[in-house]
Every structure is written in structure tokens, then in C-alpha cells.
Amino acid sequence: MNKVKHNPLNLAFAHVALITYTIIALFPVIVILINSFKTRKAIFRDPLSLPNSDSFTMVGYETVFKQGDFLQYFQNSMIVTVVSLFFILLFGAMAAFALAEYRFKGNTLMGLYLAIGIMIPIRLGTVAILQIMVAGGLVNTLTALILVYTAQGLPLAIFILAEFMRQVSDDLKDAGRIDGLSEYRIFFVLVLPLVRPAMATVAVFNMIPIWNDLWFPLILAPGEATKTLTLGSQVFIGQFVTDWNAVLSALSMAILPVMILYIIFSKQLIRGITSGAVK
């Protein structure tokens, strides 16, 4: 059996590209983090310098925990993001499997219909969405945000996952059917493990917009008990005066869970990218 030989140049290029991307992506995060520990004057005087004995302060973090319920905002954002991603991946993968595996009248039209959500922003239907949530008694609930974000992420998820699932070997699925596996077991046991890089891609693409969104939390869940972290941080931004220490401190603490979730999901994403680059 011939062994696959990795091209050293392609491997080196992939490593350099990943390192460069990481540095570029982390630079704004580092700037926000170091400035969250500096006085207001030091932030504007020299934003790229590290805090020293004269500029170091924790006043921003103290303000964040004194004003508003930061831990509640953090919990709300985590619940909304994680649950929404779970439903996007689950329902998106199931719909993509049906479109890729089964041939029926309207298959192509159904795929195009689901893809329309990629081209038309869901925010255009904000008024109708609000009316639906009011009629269903879901205003000021995390359920409203989860439903909206799930609907927002499904079109892209179905579009990406369907293309990957069409590449899964038909022989593998037919062998499973011969062995007596149900369609559900074929989907969960045989197909899903093979499209993990694609699912990681979908998760990464949807995670950041959900976590950082301000529009729908402001409209559907502005109550104190249902505020997300992004909405709760707006209390420090005024029309005439902005508490930059508190804003940067809140952003620093908000970045941490996003980075953790990104690392969890991007592992499969990076593996899929590099596997295609080094063959």
C-alpha cells in the first residue's frame, strides 16, 4: 500500500498561515485585555503599553460587578449560545441528510428554499417575529432568543452540511442497511462522525454572531432577568459619558468563554483544513 507523502512546503505554509491568523486574531483581544487593567488616562495616552505601577487599576472590574448582575448576564448568554448551537447542528444535520440522501420531487426546490435564508437577513422580519413572540407569550424569555437564533443559523448549516454529506460513501451507508441498521443509526453512527469538520465550521460561523448580537436581545428579551452579556454591557455606554474601564473589563470577561468555545469547535475545523492542505 502506498503511503501518503506530505509536501513539506505545503505543511510549512499551512503552519505559517495558522500562526499568522492566530496573531492577527488575538491582537485586538490582547489590546482590550491589557487596557482593562489601566486607568482612563493611560488607556487614551498609550493604549498599546502594558499596565505599570502608575496605570494599573481594577476599578473597571469592580464597577462591572457592582452595577448590574453580570453573572446573570453571562449565564443567559451561555445558555442561549450553547442551546442554539445544539439545535442548529442537530436540525441542520438532519435536514441536510434528508436532502443529500433521499431523492424526491421538489428536492432541489426545497434546498433552494432553505438557502434563501442565507441571502435574506432575518432582521427584516423583526416586526413579524416580535408579534409572534408576543402572541406566544415568549417576550422576555430566553426561549425567544433560542428560537430566533436557531432559525437564523439553519439555512447556512443545511447548505454546508448537505454538500459534505453528499460526499459520504454510498457503499458505507448501504453496508449499514444490509447489516440491519435503521436510518437513524446510519445518520448518527456512520454519517455524523464523518462530517465533524463541517459541523465544527457551522458552529464557528454561528457562535460569534449569536454571542455578540445586540439586536434581538434588545427587542425580544430586554428584561433584567433575561439580558445577555452584550446587552448588559451597554449600561456602561452613555450618550455623553462612557465608562471605558467598565466597558473594557466587561468585554475582557466576555471574550474568555467565546475563546473556549472557539477552541473546542475549531479543533475539527483546523484538522479538516490542514488535512486538505498537506496531502
Image: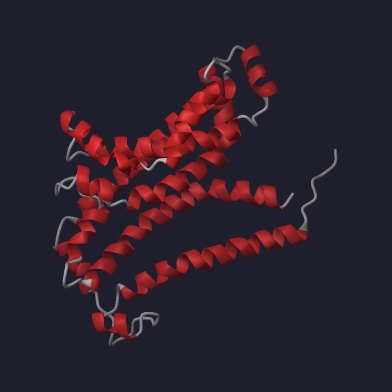
Using residue 18 as the reference point, say whether residue 138 is left or right of it.
left
Q: Quadrant of residue 29?
A: bottom left
* Image coords of residue 132 (percent x, y): 22, 31
Q: Nearer the viewer, residue 147 or 186?
A: 147
Using residue 279 as the reference point, say whether residue 85 is left or right of it.
left
Q: Is residue 40 above or below residue 68?
A: below
Using residue 212 as the reference point, say whether residue 268 is left or right of it.
right
* Image coords of residue 200 (percent x, y): 51, 43
Q: Quadrant of residue 49?
A: bottom left
Q: How many marks?
A: 0
Q: Residue furthest right?
A: 1
Q: Which residue is drawn at 53% across and 63% down?
A: 22
Q: Quadrant of residue 54?
A: bottom left
Q: In this view, does 205 lie above or below 63?
A: above
In the rendered image, the quadrant that contains the N terminus is top right
* Image coords of residue 73 (percent x, y): 22, 52
Using residue 70 as the reference point, say whether residue 171 is left or right of it.
right
Which colour assignment does the render follow? secondary structure
* Image coords of residue 234 (percent x, y): 21, 60
Q: Which of 164 and 258 is in front in this view?
A: 164
Q: Which of 159 and 224 is in front in this view?
A: 159
Q: Which of 71 and 22 is in front in this view?
A: 22
Q: In this view, does 7 lie above or below 63?
A: above
Q: Residue at x 19, y 34 (%)?
A: 131
Q: Residue furthest bottom?
A: 54
Q: Which residue is drawn at 62% across and 49% down?
A: 273
